[in-house]
Image (cartoon, rainbow, N blue to C red):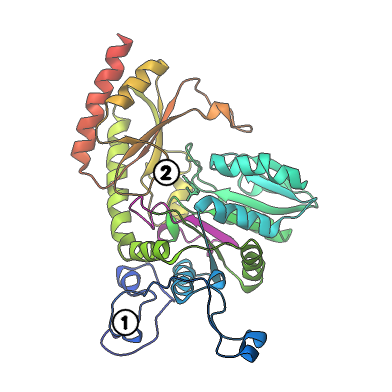
Amino acid sequence: MGNDRNKPGNPVFSASTGYTDLVNLGRAPHQHHGFINIPVYHGSTVLFPTAKAFIEYKQEYTYTRAGTPTSRNFEKSMAGLEGGYGTILCPSGLNAITTSLLAFLKSGDHLLMVDSVYQATRRFCEMFLCNLDIETTYYDPLIGGDIGRLVKPNTKVIFTESPGSQTMEVQDLPAICKIAHQHEIVVITDNTWATSVYYDVLKLGVDISVQAVTKYIGGHADLMMGVATAGGERHFATLKSAHKLQGLYVGGDDINLAARGLRTLRLRLERHMENGIAIAEWLRTRSEIEEVLHPALAGNPGHDIWKRDFDGAGSLFSVRLKPYSDDAVFAMLDHLECFGIGESWGSFESLVLPFNPSTYRTVNVWPDEGYSLRFYIGLENPEDLIADLKAGFEVLNSYEA
Ligand SMILES: Cc1ncc(COP(=O)(O)O)c(C=O)c1O
C-alpha cells in the first residue's frame, strides 16, 4: 500500500485484508508526533472559536457524540476493510443489528428473517419490531433463490446470517441478493462468524454488513462493540441517520482496543481456523457424536457454498450428540478445564455451551430432543483441548453406564 512510515503522510483506509494492510490501516504516525498508534480522544464539549462559528456549525468536530478523530479513524478503517462506503460504530454487536433494522424498516413493513439467526436478534423482532407493526416472517436458511416466493409488496429487508448461529447453515447470499434487488429490498448480513477478512459479503451483493466487534476484532473478551457498514452512499445516509437520531456513541478507549485488534486480526483468525478445524475433525471420529456442524468440513451441508463464497472459517461450530441425559451432558461440561462455559466468543479462550434449537426454531424442525454443544475454539494448543475433551467424554460415558 506504499505508506512510507518514516515520512509524513495521510492514513490509508482502502485496505485489502492482507497482513501489511491490516498493520498499516488508518495509521499516520507523523501526524501524531511519530507515535505509532492513533491517539484516543476523550470528550463531551467541543469548543468553537467564535459565536458565529458555532451558529454556522461547520467545523469538522462539533460534539463528541457526533464523532472524534478516534471514532472517525476507526469508522474509515472498518469501511476500508469491508470495501464499503461508510461505517457506523455501535455500543454492541446486537445494537449494530437493531440499528440497521430500524434504519430500513418502518411501521407497516415486512421483514424476512433467517430462522437460524442469533437468538437476541430473534427476540428483537418478536418483542420490539412487532410493537412497531413490523411483521417478521422466518425463512429456511437454505432457501437460496426460492426466497422470492416469500416476498410481499411491503417486504423491505431480508436479514441473513451465514453460517447460522448454533446450527451453522451456510446461506446462498448471491442468490438471495439477486432476488432482493429485483424488488428493491435491502439485504443485511450478520458477518460476525467469518468477519470481512474471510467473507466479503458486500462484494457478494449484500447492502449492509454487520459485525460484532466484541468477537474476533476485539479478540480479547475485554470490550463490547458493533459495526454496520453500508456498501453504497444512499444506504449509508439512511444508516447514519438512524445512528445519529438514536444518539449512539462508543467511547474512545473501546475504539482503541478494537483498532488494536485489527493489527493481529488475520493472524489470530488463521490460528483460530486451524485449531477449529483440527478439533472439529477429531470430534468427527468420536462415537459420542452424531454430527459435526462445521462449514469447512467436507461433506457438511453448506460446504460447497462455503468453498465458493468464503476465504476461510471462524472457529465457532456445533456438534449434535448421540442421545445422552441432560445430567450426563452437564457433568461432561463441568469436568472440562480448557473450555469456559459462557456467552460470547472470539477471544483467546475456548468455550462450550449446551443448546437446544427445538425450543426456538420455527421453520426447520431440529432432529434432537436433547442438548447439542456449541464449541468456540481459542488459541490454546489443540492437543491440550483434545486431551481435555477426551477426559470429558469419559465422564459422559461413565454417566450412561
Ligand atoms: C453471530 C452474533 N451476532 C451478534 C452478536 C451480538 O454481539 P454483542 O454480544 O456484541 O451484542 C453475537 C453475540 O454472541 C453473535 O454471536
Assign a secondary structure to mark 2. Answer: loop
Residue drawn at x 53%, y 78% as measured from the top left: 46
Please state which of residues 180 and 154 is positioned toward the viewer in this rendering. Answer: 154
Q: Report whether the residue tagged 2 is closer than 8 Å to ligand 1.
A: yes
Identify the residue position indicated by label 2 in the image. Answer: 344
- The quadrant of the rendering that contains the N terminus is bottom left
| Residue range highlighted in magenta | 197-222
Mark 2 crowdedness (10 Å alpha carbons): few <14, some 14-19, many ≥20: few
Q: Position of residue 301 (x, y in %)?
A: 47, 39
Please tell me how many numbered marks the rendered image carries: 2
- Residue 29: give its label: 1
Q: Quadrant of residue 178?
A: bottom right
Q: Is residue 202 magenta?
A: yes
Residue 392 appears anywhere in the view: yes
Q: Position of residue 187 (x, y in %)?
A: 63, 57
Tell me the amino acid under the disc marked 2.
Ser
